[in-house]
Image (tube, helix red, strand yellow):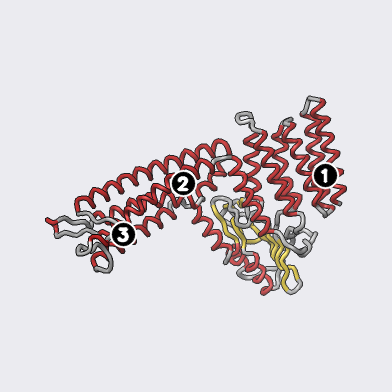
Amino acid sequence: MSARVKAWLETLGDLFWLRPALVVLGCILLAHFGVWLEMAHVAGYDASSPDQNWGYSGGAEGARALLSAIASSNIGVAGTTFSITIAALTLASGQMGPRLLRNFIRDARNQTVLGIFLGTFAYALMVLRTVRTVEESPFVPHLAITGAIVLALVAVGTLVWFVHHIATSINIETVVDAVQRDLCEAIAIHTRDEPVAVRPPEAPAGTAVAATGGGYIQAMDTDALADWAREHRVTVTLRVRPGDYVPSGYPVAFLSAQVEGAEAAILDAVTLGRRPAAIQDPEYSVRQLVEIAVRALSPGINDPFTAGSVVDHLGDALCRIAPRHLPTGVVLREGRAVLVHPVTDYDGLCDAMFHMIRQNAAGSVHVLGRMLDVLARVAEVERLKDRTAELSRHADLVIAAARRDVADPSDLADLEDRHRRFYDAAAVGA
């Protein structure tokens, strides 16, 4: 599947109305199918054997009353469901940041719940219009009405489940855990079991090409671009990576030699959008977690325990990276580097994880101490010296911030002791 198709599918997931619309359409088709079965005498109420019938066996007036009650109640509950969802989104936006709203909107369970209530309403409405009394050439689709009763019972159970789901989904630990799962999935996708090609040290050379219309880089089809570069025997050096915002007219690549059709090939491999996407950006989930921690450390919320929990989850992500290798951004074809593109390295990942949290901790002994403990645990499982050196740099920055902001001598002494334990753990890991 190409990167452009994946970006398109992710955009579809952001459409809150798509799944409810599909569920409503399915219920309408199901209503027509149930009525057709009754009209074709394939299945339905058998007046000659009333004892063997199951489901609805009443008359036209009772059917109309029943379907009207089901339709009116479900459209009312659908409005209530939508109101609960909006309230949850407002709470999440205020406490965890507006960028976390995407996780709630993309939640297939929230979308499906709304679809079930609206679908039941549409089903009852479609069946109701076919019910006719004696004065109108009598017809009562007993099988379809039985289906409406079943859907009504499903809607009742869905309402109970939805209240439970929405109450647990706005819990901060649930949100942090969900984002961390996305981060772990991104790590599994973007890291390798074996070392990859070494990135060339020289600066990009050649002609800048492929000016864009502006937007966020959502995905890049590096394999297709590398095949094109091999075919034309050139080297393409990209200047941007997924997650970057590219201003209008900015050339996104360098070409080692002029080739006809190069700009079209490069722009075809780059997918732009109005907002960042998580498809190929391993820092996307990191930024979401960091935003939760920074908001928790704000004076208005003042929740260092949430910030400490975020640091724990970030440390778990680094421990998952320890036995694996990050890509270098070099794509080889026939032993030759045909494509070089920016990637997230270990140093950049650690900076994205810890810099803003440390800067906003502002003397919070709990958060600074938790950062030192997490860094020590990561250093104990890390085996690469350059990564251990990066962890040591962050540990030194944490203790420097503590010496500047922590006034209590006993608290500072405790942090100094944790700093020493970090280097002990780093020595064990090495």
Image position, residue 179 (x, y; %) = 61, 48
Reading the image, the residue beneath label 3 is 31
Q: Quick one: label 1 or label 2, which is nearer the N terminus?
A: 2
Observer-nearest of 221 and 128:
128
Reading the image, the residue beneath label 1 is 392
Q: Is residue 20 left or right of residue 98?
A: left
* Quadrant hosting residue 406: top right
Q: Residue at x 42, y 43 (%)?
A: 82
Helix, strand or loop at label 2? It is helix
Is label 1 or label 2 in front?
A: 2
Image position, residue 216 (x, y; %) = 59, 52
In this view, which residue lies farthest toward the front? Answer: 51
As measured in the structure, the alpha-carbon distance from the residue carrying label 3 to the one carrying label 2 is 25 Å
Mark 3 Cα-neighbour bin, 10 Å: few <14, some 14–19, many ≥20: many
Number of numbered discs: 3
Reading the image, the residue beneath label 2 is 161
Above or below, 257 against 110 in this view is: below
Is label 3 or label 2 in front?
A: 2
Q: Quick one: label 1 or label 3, which is nearer the N terminus?
A: 3
Mark 1 Cα-neighbour bin, 10 Å: few <14, some 14–19, many ≥20: many
